[in-house]
């Protein structure tokens, strides 16, 4: 039985198994990148002054293209409302609304950079779902380390308040440290970077305190890295324990290992391991 027009559109737009579907998604991603590049270029005054009309025309062409694509997705989807309220459905809608809203609110046009979120479809197009396991490992590590990271940020905040208060007393309003909150802002900027230069200590004592703040910043940078590295190592150890040989039933293999380290028998395929770990 031949497919209907709706089914053909569905297989092209939502499918990546067919050459037509894969080509459609790749062309769509290139169009998204070009449209975002046009918006970014339009925000540059010199470029806007010279090519503003061309960029505006290109933007409307992209918007009409994405509007037709969005309508086709809603039309061909077996459950249109499910698509409309899904993550990609909301992003697809938000990617075309700013252009129409710009007719009433010109500043809304720059919200079109939200289209860049649509590039997330590349994970589906290029079959990168396999690497979601690595993303899950990182997420689990962050969850396990959340209490340690919270304590770390608490200590950083206390140090920032102390340094900011001292700098307010030493430098004072005459040197830009007009309040304790502004001095705390300077401390956080100094600890995390090397300062923006909008506030700088002028006295020798203030510069000495600033030096201590900078050295403290370099010292604490490694702490969250070490915490997260330790948790990732634990999670990798758990993952390796799940990769077991069906013959000798010994674990400890790397997730990408193809053969057993002990008996040399071929290990289960990656998708079978995933089903085994989820079960």
Image: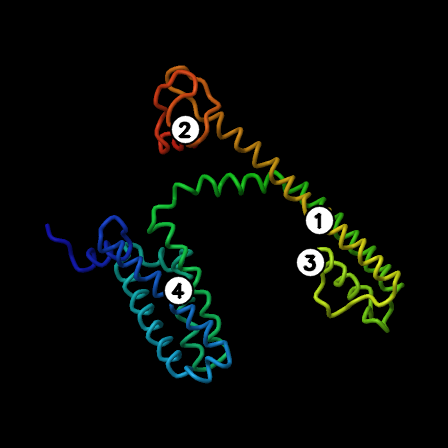
Q: In which quarter of the image is the C terminus?
A: top left
Q: In which quarter of the image is residue 97?
A: bottom left
- Cα separation, mark 4 vs mark 1, equals 36 Å
CA–CA distance between discs 2 and 3? 41 Å
User: Quick one: label 1 or label 3, which is nearer the N terminus?
Assistant: 1
Q: Residue furthest left?
A: 1
Element on which disc 4 rests: helix
* Mark identifier at residue 153: 1
Mark 4, residue position: 33
Q: Distance between the residues labelled 4 and 2?
A: 37 Å
Q: In this view, does 77 lie to the left or right of 44?
A: left
Q: Along the polypeptide, which appears first: circle 2 or circle 1?
A: 1
Mark 4, residues whose alpha carbon is within 10 Å: few (<14), some, or many (≥20)? some
Q: Answer with left or right where residue 114 lies relative to residue 173.
A: left
Real-space Cα separation, disc 3 to disc 4, in angstroms: 31 Å
From the viewer's perspective, is 190 left or right of 18?
right
């Amino acid at each position: 039985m031949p497919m209907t027009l709706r089914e053909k559109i569905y297989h092209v737009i939502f499918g990546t198994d067919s050459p037509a579907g894969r080509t459609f998604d790749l062309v769509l991603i290139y169009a998204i990148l070009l449209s975002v590049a046009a918006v970014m270029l339009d925000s540059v005054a010199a470029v806007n002054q010279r090519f503003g009309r061309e960029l505006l025309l290109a933007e409307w062409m992209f918007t009409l293209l994405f509007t037709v694509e969005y309508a086709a997705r809603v039309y061909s989807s077996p459950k249109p409302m499910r698509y409309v309220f899904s993550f990609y459905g909301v992003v697809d809608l938000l990617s075309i609304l700013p252009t129409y809203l710009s007719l009433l609110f010109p500043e809304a046009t720059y919200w079109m950079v939200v289209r860049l979120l649509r590039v997330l479809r590349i994970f589906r197009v290029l079959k990168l779902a396999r690497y979601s396991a690595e993303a899950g490992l990182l997420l689990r590590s962050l969850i396990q380390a959340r209490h340690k990271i919270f304590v770390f940020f608490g200590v950083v905040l206390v140090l920032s308040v102390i340094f900011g208060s001292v700098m307010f007393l030493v430098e004072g309003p005459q040197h830009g440290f007009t309040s304790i909150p502004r001095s705390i802002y300077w401390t956080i900027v100094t600890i995390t970077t090397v300062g923006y230069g909008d506030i700088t200590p002028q006295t020798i004592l203030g510069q000495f305190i600033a030096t201590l703040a900078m050295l403290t910043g370099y010292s604490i940078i490694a702490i969250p890295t070490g915490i997260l590295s330790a948790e990732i190592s634990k999670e990798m150890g758990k993952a390796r324990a799940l990769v077991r040989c069906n013959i000798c039933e010994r674990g400890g293999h790397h997730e990408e290992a193809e053969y057993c380290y002990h008996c040399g028998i071929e290990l289960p395929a990656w998708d079978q391991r995933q089903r085994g770990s989820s079960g």
